[in-house]
Image (cartoon, rainbow, N blue to C red):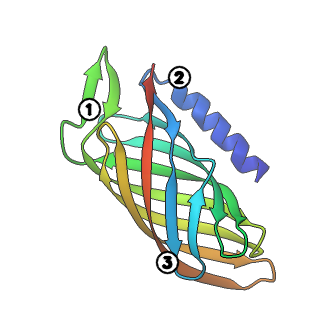
Amino acid sequence: MRRIVWILIFLVGMLHAQGHKTLLGLDPSITIDSYAGLDVNIAPLVYQKPLNAFWDIRLSSILNYRPTLDDGYISGAGFDVGVPLHIRGSGVLKSNALHVGVGTGALRDFTHARTKINLWLELGLIQYGGTTDLWNNVWQIGASYSFWDDGRMSTFTHFGFKFIFGWWME
């Protein structure tokens, strides 16, 4: 896990030096999965950096809270890395040669989360669809692969909504 965090810090530093605008913001999301119900991300920080006119890279934090009838609990913590592709619209808004992605798009996403309650490491492959204009409204559907501490493996599907908002900064 430490190695992954250092790699992400290195990548963020490299991306920041590229001269494009950077999105810093919040990424609140609600996920409904097939095995346990509803999760709400309560620490939804997001960093997004355009790579060129059509591709971005997005890093988001995950701290999922699962409300229950008795009492809620933290169900998982981790991060996800996404690569949005802008496929319709102007592609970019250029302001002093700094790119900001807009238009309709798709996003492939990789999630890494550790769930202490359920005792597994979760790796997810998620497909997003939606718009990436002023407000980044997207829906998600995907599958997660769970590696249990006792050696078992399982898969489950989920569906959710994300609403990303933030500020493009130079």
- Can you tell which of label 3 and label 1 is closer to the viewer? 3
Instruction: Quote the CA–CA distance across marks 2 and 1.
Output: 19 Å
| Residue occupying the point 64% across, 67% down | 66
In this view, which residue lies farthest toward the right? 150
| Residue occupying the point 63% across, 84% down | 154
Q: Relative to residue 160, is residue 117 drawn left or right? A: right
The quadrant in which residue 71 appears is: bottom right
Q: Relative to residue 29, is residue 114 drawn left or right? A: right
Q: Position of residue 3 (x, y in %)?
A: 75, 48
Q: Up-down: is 38 above or below 23? A: below
Instruction: Quote the CA–CA distance across marks 3 and 1.
Output: 33 Å
Q: Secondary structure at mark 1?
A: strand
Image quarter (top left, top right, bottom left or bottom right) of the N terminus: bottom right
Determine crowd level at label 1: few under 14, some 14-19, many 20+ residues with C-alpha closer than 10 A: some
Q: Which residue is mark 3?
A: 157
Q: Which residue is mark 2?
A: 17
Amino acid tagged 3: Thr
Image quarter (top left, top right, bottom left or bottom right) of the C terminus: top left
Amino acid tagged 1: Val
Q: Position of residue 4 (x, y in %)?
A: 70, 49
Mark found first going from the N terminus, 2 or 1: 2
In this view, which residue lies farthest toward the left? 89
Determine crowd level at label 2: few under 14, some 14-19, many 20+ residues with C-alpha closer than 10 A: few
Q: Which residue is mark 1?
A: 92
Q: Secondary structure at mark 2?
A: loop
Q: Relative to residue 81, is residue 99 drawn left or right? A: left
